[in-house]
């Protein structure tokens, strides 16, 4: 039987490309992590200010699709086996949820959240519906 393309692949790529486009439109350097090297970090972003790359770098984990929307109207990023990695990372890890319904990108500081909640090892990190990723965010 031939290999099958996961039905979620197109949506996952759409979200990753939406994040890449936003960052690159604002002068940032977006470096996608090859899938075989993805251990909870989909990309690294060198942040820019006024057209110049700054010393600031963040890692991003991008989740895409309506399945990351919660019943309360917010979003959530599953922790899975990444809690310790995100919590102890020397490069801040941010989560981004892409909702294809409104093409919005919402974000959360995964490293900060997990450091503030050291007891979390499973479950999900909440992402507020109004935490839209914008150039000002």
Image: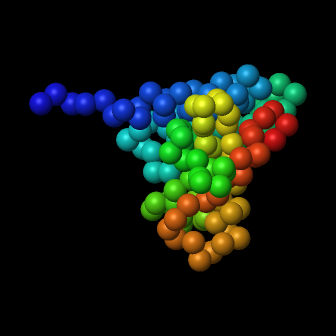
Q: Can you tell which quarter of the image residue 72 is in?
A: bottom right
Measured along the vertical axis of the image, is residue 108 above or below residue 27?
below
Measured along the vertical axis of the image, is residue 52 above or below residue 59?
above
**Residue 38 x, y percent position in the rendering:** 45, 45
**Which residue corresponds to the image point at 59% horizontal and 52% vertical from the top-left?**
70
- Does 73 sit left or right of 4 as displayed? right
**Which residue corresponds to the image point at 67% horizontal and 69% vertical from the top-left?**
115
**Residue 80 x, y percent position in the rendering:** 46, 60
- Does 86 sit left or right of 106 as displayed? left
Q: In which quarter of the image is the C terminus?
A: top right
**Residue 32 x, y percent position in the rendering:** 53, 34
**Which residue corresponds to the image point at 74% horizontal and 38% vertical from the top-left?**
133
For this rendering, which residue is in front, 19 or 34?
19
**Which residue corresponds to the image point at 83% horizontal and 25% vertical from the top-left?**
51
Q: Quadrant of the N terminus?
A: top left
Q: Can you tell which quarter of the image residue 35 is in?
A: top left
For this rendering, which residue is in front, 131 or 45?
131
On the question of residue 85 being in view, the answer is: no
For this rendering, which residue is in front, 99 or 95?
99
- Does 52 sit left or right of 68 as displayed? right
**Residue 106 x, y percent position in the rendering:** 69, 42
Measured along the vertical axis of the image, is residue 40 above or below residue 112?
above
For this rendering, which residue is in front, 130 or 120?
130
On the question of residue 97 being in view, the answer is: yes
């Amino acid at each position: 039987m031939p290999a099958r393309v996961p039905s979620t692949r197109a949506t996952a790529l759409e979200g990753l490309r939406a994040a890449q486009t936003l960052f690159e439109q604002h002068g940032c350097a977006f470096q996608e992590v090859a899938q075989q090297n993805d251990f909870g970090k989909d990309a690294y972003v060198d942040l820019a200010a006024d057209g110049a790359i700054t010393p600031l770098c963040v890692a991003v984990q991008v989740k895409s699709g309506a399945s990351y929307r919660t019943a309360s109207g917010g979003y959530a990023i599953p922790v899975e086996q990444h809690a310790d990695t995100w919590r102890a990372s020397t490069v801040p890890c941010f989560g981004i949820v892409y909702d294809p319904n409104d093409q919005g990108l919402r974000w959360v500081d995964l490293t900060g959240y997990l450091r503030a909640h050291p007891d979390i090892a499973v479950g999900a990190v909440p992402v507020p519906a109004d935490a839209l990723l914008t150039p000002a965010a």
